[in-house]
Image (spheres, rainbow, N blue to C red):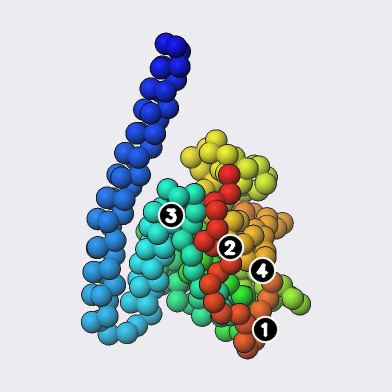
Amino acid sequence: MIGLLVWVAAVAAVHFEGRRRLTLVARAGHDVRGPLCTARLALEGLEPCARVAAIDLELRRAALALEDLAAAGRGRRAGGRWEAVDLGRLLAAATPAWNALAIARGAALTVDGCGGGARAAGDPLRLAQACANLVANAVEHGGGRVHVRLATEGARTRVEVTDDGPDLPAPLPSLLAAARGRRTPRGHGLAIAAGIAERHGGRLISLPSITGARLALDLPAAPSAGGRRGAQPAASGALPS
């Protein structure tokens, strides 16, 4: 009987702790959501330019991450929109913010292929999130020169990110498995990019490189016109274990 009471008390304590953490997350999310909304509204009064557009994109990415955090308490992720995404325009819009990050870290960034009309079917914010994680990983852990290249080969489109720093510390599958298994504080950006690629019918791959790391989002190419529009089918589903 005593053992049963101890077990019930332990379960109740775990349940209470879980609810307390969810409450703290909800309150933090509420406090962050307000400034994000205010910052985006403030941008509307500024003269349109590439830098303003890049800041707006980063704020929308932050808001998406916040929605993911709120949905994680229910074992899910935030939903999104599915459309034919012009990857060149997406990269061009993000480049000013990536340049600022590279300069702050002492790296030099180049982005090529933005005018090629490469498209992928998916959620533009999720794809921006994946690309940004690859660029941030290259800038922070590779450094030196970081090269982003967009190319379409047949029915596939690739966003390649190359740096001239040290190579990956382990094979990419091992890094992703460790990050997904929460066995390391590093590699989460790559795991996020890989998960987004998979939900878009693609994959994150490591390619041969003379120096440094060379990672690519390999995605199915969408037709130059048309494409699906509607709720993203996998983004709001249950989170993988």
Where is mark 3, residue-wise?
Answer: 71
* Neighbourhood count class around disc 4 (C-alpha, 10 Å): few under 14, some 14–19, many 20 upward: many
Task: Check contact, mark 2 vs mark 4: CB within 8 A.
Answer: no
Q: Quadrant of residue 38?
A: bottom left
Total numbered labels placed on residues in the image: 4
Relative depth, front residue between 24 and 11: 11
Mark 1 vs mark 3: give the one in front. 3
Q: Quadrant of residue 15?
A: top left
Give the residue at x 35% y 73%. Answer: 56
Where is mark 2, residue-wise?
Answer: 234
**Label disc, if present, on residue 219 of the rendered structure:** 4
Look at the picture and state if 160 lies above or below 69: below
What's the residue type where badge 2 is placed? Ala
Q: Position of residue 80 (x, y in %)?
A: 49, 69
Q: CA distance from mark 4 to mark 3?
A: 26 Å
What's the residue type where badge 1 is placed? Pro
Q: CA distance from mark 1 to mark 3?
A: 32 Å
